[in-house]
Amino acid sequence: MSSAFRRTVRGMRDLLPEEAEKLRFIEETARKLARLYGYREVITPVVEHYGLLSAKIGEETRKRMYVFEDLGGRKVALRPEFTASVARLVATRMRSVPKPLRLFSVGSLYRYDEPQFGRYREFWQSNYELFGSSKPEADAEIVALTADLLKRINLRDYHLKMNHVGILRGILDKEGIAETQQNDVMQLLDKKRWEDALKLVQEAGGSKRCLDNVRALLDIRGKDTDEVTEEMREVAQGYPEGLEAVKNLREILSLIEKSGVESDFFLEAGFARGLEYYTGMIFEIFVPGMDIALGGGGRYDKLIELFGGGIVPAVGVAPGIDRLSLALDKQETVPQKTGEERVLVIPVDDDMVVEAFGISSFLRKKGLCTEIEAMGRSVSRALSDADRRGITHAVIVGPREMRQGKVVLREMEKRRQETVSLEELHEKIGRNNGQQINTG
Ligand code: HAM
């Protein structure tokens, strides 16, 4: 075997149990939240037509897609996000489903990004999309749900960076700058190449007034949402679409603030997202000490129409599971699990193996996580291994006790043991360990 095969492909990772547990903890929390807010899960394929995935993904992500021809000669790609697939469903098989329609997805995605901290070629997202409403309530719900998820996983000190693409697009539209050129400007802003963006506006035929206004817009940012939206409004004077966008952003923020969402906001008028389909409010999640977004979303009212599904306004968000996990690590937050017992059943000799098997399956039926000593080790060696692996209870099965329908139950941490009857075994284990334990 070539030594190259002993490593994963560049950018791909093996997740060992501890890492996998952390990802699954976030995934489970995200799934619970979906149920709580009425989002039903859809499972879409990892492989889709290239044309679908690339339609409005934006230049940057488009060139990072894993694209290949399948054996049937179709040009296909691995999904770099969920939104296009879910929008395809809403434009086709779910077209006649009454709106509002709330859909949730979770799974792996693929982008040929340059591997570095928090940037992988295979990564996980939880994804929430709300279809059918153009009202600010829908945008506010998506933002509130995001903040709720962050709170439930115990992320601290996060803020949501926010903007509305309609403000800049309103200004550029009035100057007659084509949508494709506007998209290029947005891509440059996404990469924080402000001067190049301004140069492009000029090259696209933007007037001096337009340039001055865009430049002024790029300087507007801050935490005080009233103050910042007022500055945005001043710059958008004379651009009806831009003014409408500022008004919409204000309505969304006011709803969020009044409904008591616990999050800090940072408005930035020059903030853009790499994906091209956004038409309204956009936002991303950040924490101090990490300059990569932990999640992002926004309103996209034209994608379903582009896929032939009629006019269906939409708004959504995709929190990145890997990056949330990294942020929790950085903040040294250990996911909490409530009272999970882990039992090891140890037969004292070969004659007791059948009994030990029976007891294991009985305990599993009672909902207890149970392993059996499968290496034929002595009781003392099995116990020291159990200690190392975080087993909470050992059940020692010996002939003397079994003759009376009993076993020895050992509480590993307290190093205490007693002889208990088989009938009361599962209750004893459950009762002894009802407190919270760390999984990390
Ligand atoms: P996105 O900003 O491209 O948005 O990705 C959302 C999140 O996925 C990012 O904030 C990040 O946490 C995670 N992510 C992206 N690329 C990588 C990577 N290479 N490695 C690790 N994590 C990564 C979307 O995908 C949109 N579909 C979100 C959306 C849903 N908008 C509306 N609805």
Image (cartoon, rainbow, N blue to C red):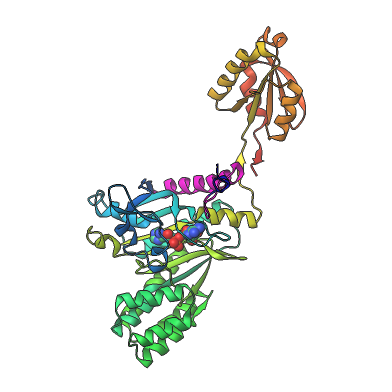
For the point 38% across and 73% down, the residue is 165
Horizontally, residue 335 falls left or right of residue 48, namely right
Q: How many numbered badges does the structure rendering display?
A: 0
Drawn side of residue 123 relative to residue 42, left or right: right
Question: Where in the figure is residue 21, as x and y percent of width and height?
Answer: 57, 43
Q: Is residue 115 above or below residue 251?
A: above
Q: Is residue 224 visible from the viewing direction of this image?
A: yes
The percent position of residue 356, horizontal first and vertical second, equals 62, 17
Location of the N terminus by quadrant is top right
Q: Quadrant of the C terminus?
A: top right
Q: Quadrant of residue 378?
A: top right
Our reading of the magenta stretch's main secondary structure is helix
- In reply to whether residue 48 is colored magenta, the answer given is no
Depth check: 422 or 250 in front? 422
- Which range of residues does the magenta coloring cover? 9-38
Q: Nearer the viewer, residue 323 or 63?
A: 63
Rendered view: 205 above or below 432: below
Residue 141 seen from this side: no
- Quarter of the image for residue 155 reads bottom right
